[in-house]
Image (spheres, rainbow, N blue to C red):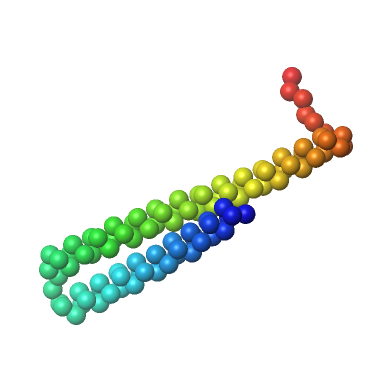
């Protein structure tokens, strides 16, 4: 359960990063329109913001994969426990491999 809570916090933090990145992109676009010209430093900042946005998207995908893996593991763990309990009680079907 601690892993799930940590993953939930991480997902929320990534969502916050996405929102911050979106705000940065909006501010950069507003600055460019106010200036009317794009100088090299603005282009560099734009590239850096785009890099951060791409990185945040990759982190978000990785966190989603971790969350799915944690969910699958939790389900598998419950299933293993249920099978073990059934085997101990002698009430479960135990497949044999030939």
Q: Nearer the viewer, residue 52 or 89?
A: 89
Residue at (62, 54) in percent of width and height? 1
The answer to whether residue 92 shows anywhere in this view is no
The quarter of the picture where residue 77 lies is: top right
The answer to whether residue 79 shows anywhere in this view is yes
Does residue 23 appear to the left or right of 68 in the view shown?
left
Residue 60 is situated, as x and y percent measured from the top left of the image, at: 44, 56
Q: Quadrant of the C terminus?
A: top right
Q: Is residue 75 above or below residue 27?
A: above
Residue 58 is situated, as x and y percent measured from the top left of the image, at: 39, 53
Does residue 32 appear to the left or right of 58 in the view shown?
left
Residue at far front of view: 2
Does residue 92 appear to the left or right of 71 in the view shown?
right
Does residue 57 appear to the left or right of 95 in the view shown?
left
Q: Is residue 82 above or below residue 25?
A: above
Residue at (41, 54) in percent of width and height? 59
The quarter of the picture where residue 82 lies is: top right
Residue at (25, 77) in percent of width and height? 30
Residue 78 is situated, as x and y percent measured from the top left of the image, at: 71, 46
Residue at (31, 59) in percent of width and height? 52
């Amino acid at each position: 359960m601690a892993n799930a809570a940590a993953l939930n916090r991480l997902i929320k933090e990534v969502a916050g990063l996405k929102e911050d990145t979106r705000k940065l992109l909006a501010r950069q676009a507003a600055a460019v329109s106010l200036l009317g010209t794009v100088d090299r430093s603005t282009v560099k900042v734009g590239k850096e913001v785009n890099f951060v946005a791409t990185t945040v998207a990759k982190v978000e995908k990785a966190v989603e994969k971790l969350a799915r893996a944690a969910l699958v593991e939790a389900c598998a763990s419950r299933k293993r426990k249920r099978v073990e309990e059934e085997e101990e009680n002698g009430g479960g079907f135990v497949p044999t491999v030939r």
